[in-house]
Image (spheres, grey):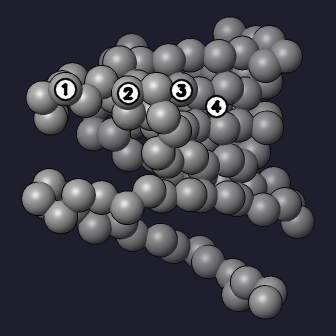
Amino acid sequence: MSGTPARFKQQRDPKTPGVEEWVHGKAQRIVYDEETDKITLIGQAQLSRTENGKQKDMTSGERIVYDMRNARSEVNSGEGKRVTTIIAPRNNAQPRQGTTLSNSTKLNQ
């Protein structure tokens, strides 16, 4: 689908009682691959996660591929553009698998 911007949202399966979790995405174009359960957001892409209506995590770039089955995303920027990611602190009682970052560049201070 295309739009200015196109939008989608997905309610995640409950992990914690009393916590309603949603994933929201927007971009100039959104492509859904039903076989792999992956959504590709293209052009001014943004992906965020909310818990009970409060934004927790957010990432943006020119292209985001979001794996709905595993709740993982890959973010790419255009030439000379930036990728932004904000990750909220996690509750220590809920262990999560680590995140791998690759193809990083030195950030200017």
Whether tag 2 and tag 3 are in contact, CB under 8 A, the answer is no
Q: Amino acid at mark 4?
A: Leu
**Would you say 15 lies left or right of 81 here?**
left
Q: Residue at x 38, y 27 (%)?
A: 52
Whether tag 1 and tag 2 are in contact, CB under 8 A, the answer is yes
Could you say which quadrant of the image residue 50 lies in?
Answer: top left
Closer to viewer: mark 1 or mark 4: 1
Q: Which mark is residue 8?
A: none
* Whole-number angstrom distance, CA of label 3 to CA of label 4: 11 Å
Question: Residue 50 or 34: which is nearer the viewer?
Answer: 50
Q: Which mark is residue 24?
A: 3
Question: Residue 68 or 93: which is nearer the viewer?
Answer: 93
Residues packed near mark 4 inside 10 Å, few (<14), some (14 to 19) or many (20 plus): many
Residues packed near mark 2 inside 10 Å, few (<14), some (14 to 19) or many (20 plus): few
Check disc 4 and report its element: helix, strand or loop: strand
**Would you say 56 lies left or right of 64 here?**
left
Check disc 3 and report its element: helix, strand or loop: strand
Q: Give the percent coordinates (x, y) of residue 48.
A: 54, 38
Q: Amino acid at mark 2?
A: Asn
Q: Residue at x 70, y 37 (%)?
A: 45
- Residue 66 in view: no
* Residue picked out by circle 1: 18
Residues packed near mark 3 inside 10 Å, few (<14), some (14 to 19) or many (20 plus): some
Residues packed near mark 1 inside 10 Å, few (<14), some (14 to 19) or many (20 plus): few
* Residue picked out by circle 4: 41
Quarter containing the C terminus: bottom right
Q: Tag 2 or tag 4, which sits nearer the N-term?
A: 4
Q: Give the percent coordinates (x, y) of residue 55.
A: 52, 38
* Residue picked out by circle 2: 52
